[in-house]
Image (spheres, helix red, strand yellow):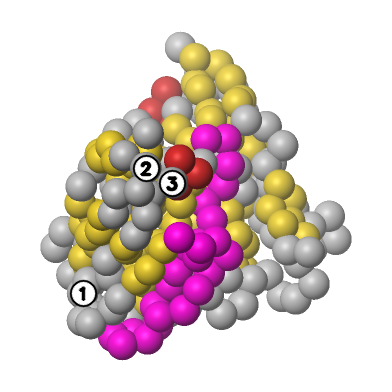
Amino acid sequence: AQRVTQPEKLLSVFKGAPVELKCNYSYSGSPELFWYVQYSRQRLQLLLRHISRESIKGFTADLNKGETSFHLKKPFAQEEDSAMYYCALGAGTYKYIFGTGTRLKVLA
Amino acid sequence: NAGVTQTPKFRILKIGQSMTLQCTQDMNHNYMYWYRQDPGMGLKLIYYSVGAGITDKGEVPNGYNVSRSTTEDFPLRLELAAPSQTSVYFCASSYGQAGAKHFGDGTRLSIL
């Protein structure tokens, strides 16, 4: 079955601490993976995608096919990173499976 | 360039009423989608469209209908509102089928 799991509903870290938001997926084909972010009172927007292998706002994510993971990482959290983060799996044609989201709170 | 625009932002309906959620995009995207998000859950696909005149069911289409008469507009209709349809509804569009999706602000719908 195709599935995206984000095990943490809430993750609280202190400003300047490293952040890792976990995402595991289940898919038999070749996955396309994305991280979306929703800041307070803003719309859901793309943060990064695995095929780009880029760093956005200091965040990176590496696809690990062996562990079927696509964890989102940032070495030093900032208060403005506080938001809801969703991992999404592109599973062919229109199918786009979202995780349940992790709320990141960065404490001062 | 407004992106994806949804109206209304909030609505309360009585059981059995009908309404249409509007969605329009100005990016000339062929692909458009409707998702619903229940509390504590991920987004689930209701309907999608690959171009004007073409629509198809997603994971949770029951109780909804859509139409796509133009590239820009993709309205979602609830014919007989039920409490189970209380949710936040998001419209999205994309250039390609697996590409990054652009979302609207969402419509918070409560059915009492």
Q: In which quadrant will I find the N terminus of chain B?
A: bottom left
Q: Secondary structure at mark 1?
A: loop
Magenta segment = B39-63
Which residue lies under the disc numbered 1? B72
Task: Say if B86 sits above or below A67 in the image.
Answer: above
Residue A46: image tag: none
Picture coordinates of residue A96, whole percent (x, y): 56, 65
- What is the chain letter for disc 3? B
Q: Earlier in the sequence, mark 3 or mark 2?
A: 2
Single out the mark in the foreground, 1 or 2: 2
Q: Residue at x 18, y 70 (%)?
A: B26
Counting residues from the start of the chain, the first of labels 1 and 2 encountered is: 2
Q: Which residue is mark 2?
A: B15
Residue B33's quadrant in the figure?
bottom left
Q: Nearer the viewer, mark 1 or mark 3?
A: 3
Q: Please state if B33 lies on the left or on the right of A77 as rendered.
A: left
Frontmost residue, B15 versus B6: B15
- Determine the residue located farthest toward the front in the rendered image: B16
Q: Residues within 10 Å of mark 2 (few under 14, many from 20)?
A: some
Per the model, the C-alpha gap separating discs 1 and 3 is: 28 Å
Residue B82 marker:
3
Image position, residue B103 (x, y; %)? 34, 56
* Tag 3 near tag 2, CB within 8 Å: yes
Q: Amino acid at mark 2?
A: Ile
B104, above or below B69, in the image: above
